[in-house]
Amino acid sequence: QVQLVESGGGLVQPGGSLRLSCAASGIIFSWYTMGWYRQVPGKQRELVARITSGDSTNYADSVKGRFTVSRDNAKNTMYLQMNSLKPDDTAVYYCNADHTVLSRDYWGQGTQVTVSS
């Protein structure tokens, strides 16, 4: 059974930082492209950051320079370091594991991030 479990969300003031974690089980983690997505009510889920099995990364323009995605294959865990947070970053953040060749795509349950004073 595949599980992706996000943690680290919460309430933070503008300009603050949070670190999200996504712990994976039931997959060969190192094979997968891992991604962070976010969604606010009434809007489509959007890509925030992604890291491939070869550690290539890409980011949404809105978070470049502020967020950093990383992975630890030994711990089957992906991270998102979020700095200089803005109210517009408020959303539910979801972890995704994707393997195009195997046609496998998995999602976590999400963790709420709220940026507010």
Image (cartoon, rainbow, N blue to C red):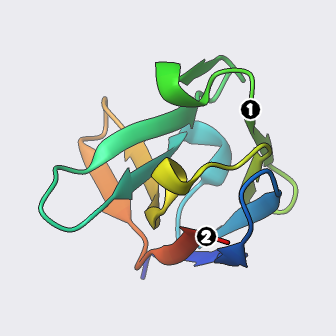
Nearer-the-camera pick, 29 or 114: 114
| Residue behind mark 1 | 66
- Residue name at image x 29 percent, y 62 percent: 40
Q: Residues within 10 Å of mark 1 (few under 14, many from 20)?
A: few
* Residue 55 quadrant: top right
In the rendering, at what x and y percent does residue 21 appear?
72, 65
Q: In the rendered image, which residue does mark 2 sit on? A: 116
Q: Quadrant of the N terminus?
A: bottom left
- Considering every residue shown, the one lying at the far left of the view is 42
Give the quarter of the figure containing the C terminus: bottom right
Q: Is residue 72 left or right of residue 110?
A: right
Mark 2 residue element: loop
Q: Earlier in the sequence, mark 1 or mark 2?
A: 1
Q: Position of residue 38 (x, y in %)?
A: 40, 54
Horizontal and vertical percent position of residue 12:
73, 71
Number of on-image labels: 2
The image position of residue 27, as x and y in percent, is 53, 62
Say what secondary structure mark 1 lies in.
Answer: loop
Q: Amino acid at mark 2?
A: Ser
